[in-house]
Amino acid sequence: MSVLDPILGPVMSLPNPWNLLLISFLITGCITLAYKFLTDQKLMKELKGEMKDLQKEMKSLKDDPKKMMEVQKRAMEKNMKYMMQSMKPTLFTLIPIIFIFSWLRGYYTDLGNPDILFGLGWLWIYIIFSIVISLSLRKILKIH
């Protein structure tokens, strides 16, 4: 018996694919909220805007490789700063996600890895649901 059985077991009593939709929503919601509150959203928006401006500048400098390399160096610095900001929530949510996915894999392996929806297995359904949910939540919560 797993530690997650009492928590996720009742959710899995829902019929497929509703159980996976609910789990996808819960996991993606937690990740999205962690991303929103563990990153400096103002800084993220500024960095995104600066990177976009630098990309435009690089396109206009395609005939001048030396200047383009200077702009590209600045863009890489901004991109690195952006990545460092986005790593905080990833580190915070990674361990719980590993446990949940391990539990889900075991659950569906015990069931014989059934096709959940349209001939797709649980992992593909989770990925599809989580992409849609993540895009929606990011739009609603104005996450950059």
Image: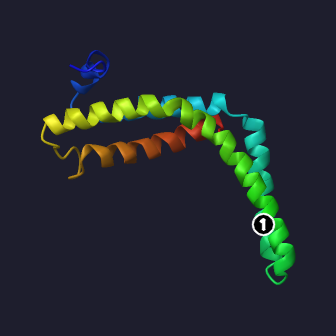
In this view, the residue farthest toward the bottom is 63
Residue 140: image quadrant is top right
> Is residue 87 shown left or right of residue 41?
left
**Residue at 38 percent of width and 46 percent of height:** 127
Q: How many C-alpha atoms fall within 10 Å of the one at disc 1: few (<14), some, or many (≥20)? A: some
Q: Is residue 45 above or below residue 6?
A: below
Give me the residue at 36% from left, 30% from top.
99
Could you say which quadrant of the image residue 38 lies in?
Answer: top right
Which quadrant is home to the N terminus?
A: top left
- Amino acid identity at mark 1: Gln
Residue 25 placement (x, y as % from top left): 42, 32
Q: Eyeballing the image, is 125 above or below 32? A: below
Does the rendering let one see residue 32? no
Q: Position of residue 43 (x, y in %)?
A: 78, 40
Residue situated in front as seen by the camera: 108 or 45 = 108
Using the rendered view, name the quadrant where residue 72 is placed: bottom right
Residue placed most toward the observer, 104 or 80? 80
- Extreme residue toward the top, this view: 6
Q: Nearer the viewer, residue 6 or 126?
A: 6
Q: Say what secondary structure mark 1 lies in.
A: helix
Residue hosting label 1: 72
Q: Position of residue 109 (x, y in %)?
A: 17, 39
Q: How many marks?
A: 1
**Which residue is located at x 80 percent, y 72 percent?**
69
Tell whether 5 sits left or right of 64: left
Residue shown at 77%/37% (left/top)? 42
* In the rendered image, the vertical position of residue 3 relative to residue 144, given as above or below: above
Colour scheme of the rendered structure: rainbow
Query: On the rendered structure, is 111 left or right of 125?
Result: left
Q: Can I make out residue 8 in this image?
A: yes
Q: Position of residue 133 (x, y in %)?
A: 47, 40
Quadrant holding the C terminus: top right
